[in-house]
């Protein structure tokens, strides 16, 4: 993933000369769904490269599960549907004994393959209930020197990813869950601590990124884990994702004890009507309260924002912008509502989706169905909200530096430099108003 293109894959095939090639989506990176144009082209090209060398190709991931024929046509021999660890173990063992052309794969659950020209799908694979049964990640196989250098050059520190859970029990109607559904399974606190100890001793990361959809959904788990992390002296600054309604005083204290430096909340909208339409199960008031508790504990706050959901007009957009001004987060991420196959949201708009079904890159911000506003408006909106946010963040940081220069640190100085965005904010704000009026005037009626 550090390469600019897939040319290195071709070289690796010639160097390693494998018997089996597996392309595996980590199931946590939604860009592989949202930026499907680019990711699908890359994956199909890699399938073709391996197939041309007469290698057995196995693909696992969200898109492959949704559309296995696309990957089988590109040269894949098998598509793994659902959790892949057990399926891959059984499949590779069978290939080793019978070869990839063997006909006896029907008893391996969670597979899609072609047989006599027809696409066959075996019984679904049951989800792993006890995640501690899995071995810890093979960190020794990572080119850690290259990875560390990349992080240091790009961000000035070294971070590693850790996952403690699989799945999410909540039912936001735009969130696709082709693998886990609404299930939620967790490693035990001790198992996670064991991995953190290995990472600290072997690689000494400056930072950790917990990739869970929700870290610490269960208060007892979070408390036990944080206490053990603290007791063993393993607290490392980390970033995580969580929900506003879970940010009780007890949970916030536990996050801080374990080393949480930054927590991202799926705020999505500042309009309660939109949150309710999304089935988010949270209130705007809970977002405000959660942000306040996290900040009081010394934890930076990030807000995910989503524009363009059906029913959102200019008043709802303004409510979201006002929420950002009021909450004053440390960072924000902006997207446009994206209909993912398998979701209730997708079914509600599928008849209105045009010829474009996927984004090519995360900055597309292109509604895939006609709504109140068009792509140019949302791109201008994103630039405006970002510029205003950064300008206001710069103003707060500058005031802090003037009040107490001796407490200046790298973060404060960096945030203060955002004052340079003031001019851009003024320009984008005018452009946004022009775009809003133009698109409002063009609407029928």
Image: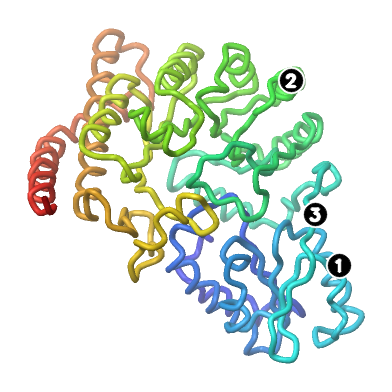
| Residue 227 or residue 242, whichever sits in front | 242
Q: Which mark is residue 220?
A: 2
Q: Which residue is mark 1?
A: 90
Q: Position of residue 91 (x, y in %)?
A: 82, 71
Mark 1 neighbour class, 10 Å CA radius: few under 14, some 14 to 19, many 20 or more = some
Horizontal arrangement in the rendering, residue 272 relative to residue 75 (left or right): left
Please tell me whether residue 158 is drawn above or below residue 422 in the rendered image: below
Q: Position of residue 194 (x, y in %)?
A: 79, 35
Horizontal arrangement in the rendering, residue 79 relative to residue 98 (left or right): left
The answer to which image quadrant residue 407 occupies is: top left
Mark 3 neighbour class, 10 Å CA radius: few under 14, some 14 to 19, many 20 or more = few
The residue depicted at 43 percent of the width and 60 percent of the height is 35
Mark 2 neighbour class, 10 Å CA radius: few under 14, some 14 to 19, many 20 or more = few
> How far apart are labels 3 and 1 at the CA level?
14 Å
> How far apart are labels 2 and 3 at the CA level?
26 Å
| Residue 415 or residue 34, whichever sits in front | 34
Q: Position of residue 302 (x, y in %)?
A: 43, 30
> How far apart are labels 2 and 1 at the CA level?
35 Å
Q: Which residue is mark 3?
A: 126
| SS type, badge 1 | helix
Horizontal arrangement in the rendering, residue 386 relative to residue 443 (left or right): right
Which of pointers 2 and 3 lies earlier in the amino acid sequence? 3
The residue depicted at 37 percent of the width and 37 percent of the height is 305
> CB of mark 2 within 8 Å of CB of mark 1?
no
* Mark toward the viewer: 3 or 1: 3
The answer to which image quadrant residue 70 occupies is: bottom right
Q: Which mark is residue 313?
A: none
């Amino acid at each position: 993933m550090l390469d600019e293109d897939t040319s290195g894959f071709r070289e690796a095939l010639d160097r390693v000369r494998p018997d089996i090639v597996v392309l595996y989506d980590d199931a946590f990176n939604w860009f592989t769904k949202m930026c499907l144009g680019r990711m699908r082209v890359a994956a199909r090209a890699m399938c073709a490269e391996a197939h041309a060398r007469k290698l057995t190709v196995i693909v696992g991931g969200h898109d492959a599960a949704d559309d296995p024929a696309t990957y089988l046509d590109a040269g894949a021999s098998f598509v793994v549907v659902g959790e892949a660890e057990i399926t891959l173990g059984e499949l590779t063992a069978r290939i080793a004994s019978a070869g990839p052309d063997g006909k006896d794969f029907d008893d391996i659950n969670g597979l899609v393959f072609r047989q006599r020209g027809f696409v066959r799908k075996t019984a679904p694979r049951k989800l792993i209930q006890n995640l501690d049964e899995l071995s810890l990640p093979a960190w020794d196989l990572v080119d850690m020197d290259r990875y560390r250098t990349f992080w240091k050059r790009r961000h000035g520190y070294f971070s590693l990813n850790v996952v403690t859970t699989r799945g999410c029990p909540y039912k936001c109607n735009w969130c696709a869950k082709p693998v886990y559904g609404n299930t939620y399974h967790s490693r035990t606190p001790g198992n996670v601590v064991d991995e953190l100890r290995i990472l600290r001793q072997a690689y000494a990361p400056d930072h950790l990124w917990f990739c869970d959809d929700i870290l610490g959904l269960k208060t007892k788990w979070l408390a036990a884990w944080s206490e053990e992390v603290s007791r063993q002296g393993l607290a490392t600054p980390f970033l995580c994702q969580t929900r506003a309604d879970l940010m009780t005083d007890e949970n916030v204290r536990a996050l801080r004890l374990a080393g949480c430096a930054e927590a991202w909340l799926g705020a999505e909208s500042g309009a309660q009507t939109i949150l309710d339409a999304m089935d988010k199960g949270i209130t705007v008031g809970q977002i405000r309260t959660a942000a306040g508790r996290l900040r009081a504990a010394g934890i930076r706050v990030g807000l995910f924002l989503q524009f363009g959901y059906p029913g959102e007009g200019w008043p709802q957009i303004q409510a979201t912008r006002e929420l950002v001004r009021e909450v004053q987060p440390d960072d924000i991420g902006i997207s446009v509502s994206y209909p993912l196959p398998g979701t209730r949201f997708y079914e509600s708009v599928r008849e209105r989706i045009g010829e474009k079904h996927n984004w090519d890159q995360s900055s597309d911000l292109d509604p895939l169905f006609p709504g109140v506003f068009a792509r140019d408006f949302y791109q201008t909106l994103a630039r405006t909200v970002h510029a205003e946010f950064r300008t206001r963040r710069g103003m707060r940081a500058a005031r802090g530096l003037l009040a107490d220069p001796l407490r200046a640190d790298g973060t404060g100085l960096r945030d203060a430099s955002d004052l340079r965005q003031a001019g851009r904010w003024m320009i984008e704000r005018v452009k946004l108003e022009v775009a809003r009026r133009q698109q409002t005037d063009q609407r029928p009626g």
